[in-house]
Amino acid sequence: MTLIDGVKAAVVLFVAAIAQVSIFSQLHVFGAVPNLLLVSLVAIALLRGSIAGAVGGFFAGLLVDTATLGTLGLTSLVLTLAGYWIGRYGETTGRDRGHAPFLSVAVVTVLYEFGLLVMHFVLGESAPAGAVVRSLIPAIVLNLIITAPVYALVRRLLRVAGREELTTEVQLLG
Amino acid sequence: MLASSVQRSKPTPYPSKARSALIRRTVIVVLVLLALTLLTISFRSPTSGALHSVQGAGSTALRPFQVAATRVAQPFRDAYDYVDGLANAKAQNARLKKQNEQLRLAALVAAGKLAKYPAYEKLLHLEQGSAFPKDFRAVNASVISYPDGPFTHQITISAGSSSGIRTNSPIVSGDGLLGRVTDVSPDTAVVTMLTDPESFVSARDLHSRVRGMVQAGSAGTLVLSQVPKQLRVVKGDEIVTDGTRNPRYPDIYPYGIPIGRVSSVGVTDTATFLQVQVQPFANFGSLDAVAALVPTKRHR
């Protein structure tokens, strides 16, 4: 990942985080909120790998926690793990598959929602599991709707990584 | 040449493979530990400390971006609200129409109850006044059916034997005597009013103490009959029930219930009795609330 790519990814995540806390957090559709930041992070992690996903998730989460004056590190932790796992998925199997962004977004939406729920529960804060479960399907649908344009935009901004930039742990033979 | 050993290049041991895995794992561990550290510090001192100050400063620095984003999104949000408002207008209109209908109905019901209020107030005044007969209690009821023609003088009230009402129980309104119960069922009772030709009430002039029988007259009035013409009855005198004269033959009406006021007194040379016309206190044509007088003593 080049420096320019890193800057582009940072800008994308910054804009997504600001839009998330300022605009998207107020768009309640069937009790759910579309998560532009999560979808952007998934796109970056798929295209740039687990380290970029984890670092991006950490700082994007830090940005959200700072902007909302929430508990610092809470969103960071969840987004770091989400970015890392999706990055690993992209590095190993999913990057070149057409359904990878959608599958990643659907899975990571569930993990993200339940991850936040568990963290809030562990911290002794309000953790309405019923509300989270009820809004899960709408949240997945909303995130899937914005996946295609966000992924296309991020893919256009970040050039496709070469084979040598991928992890060498899993190499295709032949 | 063939026997000599072939120099082969040393195979590359994929150093980047292990290295990148190590880097990757180090990064994720460091980031997770960092997040957990921030989480712990922030959770332990959510409103104070250096971290909170840094977070506040960061939030302040981000504020202009958030404001800018909100302003950029505002036209789209307004457009969305407008479209959403249009989409919901039809449903909202139907809901408001239904609500309006319900409110109108509730207003009508309230107005109807309010119209009955004076009748209830008078009734309450009568029941709490000194003229209310002793040894009786009032069973309040509303009128649920009215006379259906000029030849019927009966009303139905919304209380019956389950409330203690029996046949011949006196019925009063807030103004005065109405009649007596002639038929009773558990929850309703039929009241035959004083305007019925078959009704007779033993009565007396409250001022001259003259006794007589009140019965139906013409045009909704009553007459005080069987008053000898040598006795004196004056126009304006109040007529009340006379109550029991002979304990062996107790009257169904207790003493002192207002009946009406003498409106005219006539006398002829040939007649034995005075012709005393009485204007009833009760308005028989407009009854809302009535009370049945139920004896409190069992033997009555």
Image: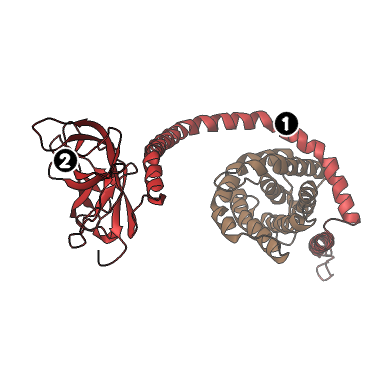
Chain colours: A brown, B red
Image location of residue A22, percent across then percent down: 72, 40
The residue at which mark 2 appears reads as B228
Residue at 77%, 51% in the rendered image: A65
Can residue B115 be seen in this snapshot? yes
Helix, strand or loop at mark 1? helix
Is B275 located above or below residue B252 in the figure?
above
Q: Is residue B239 left or right of residue B183?
A: right
Question: Which of the two marks, 2 or 1, is nearer to us in this view?
Answer: 2
Residue at 40%, 51% in the rendered image: B130
Cβ atoms under marks 2 and 1 closer than 8 Å? no
Residue type indicated by callout 2: Pro
Residue type indicated by callout 1: Arg
How many numbered discs sit on the rendered protein? 2
Q: Is residue B199 left or right of residue B125?
A: left
Image location of residue A119, percent across then percent down: 70, 62
**Which circle marks residue B109 in the picture?**
none
Q: Is residue B156 left or right of residue A14?
A: left
Q: CA distance from mark 2 to mark 1?
A: 100 Å
Image location of residue B22, percent across then percent down: 82, 64
User: Depth check: B87 or B165 in front?
Assistant: B165
Of all residues, the one furthest to the right in this rendering is B50
Chain of residue at mark 2: B
Image location of residue A98, percent across then percent down: 59, 47
Q: Is residue B273 left or right of residue A120?
A: left
Of all residues, the one furthest to the left in this rendering is B270
**Which circle marks residue B71 in the picture?**
1
Q: Quadrant of the C terminus of chain B?
A: bottom left
Question: Residues at marks 2 and 1, common chain?
Answer: yes
Residue at 72%, 59% in the rendered image: A81
How many neighbours does mark 1 have within 10 angstroms: few (below 14), some (14-19), or many (20 or more)?
A: some
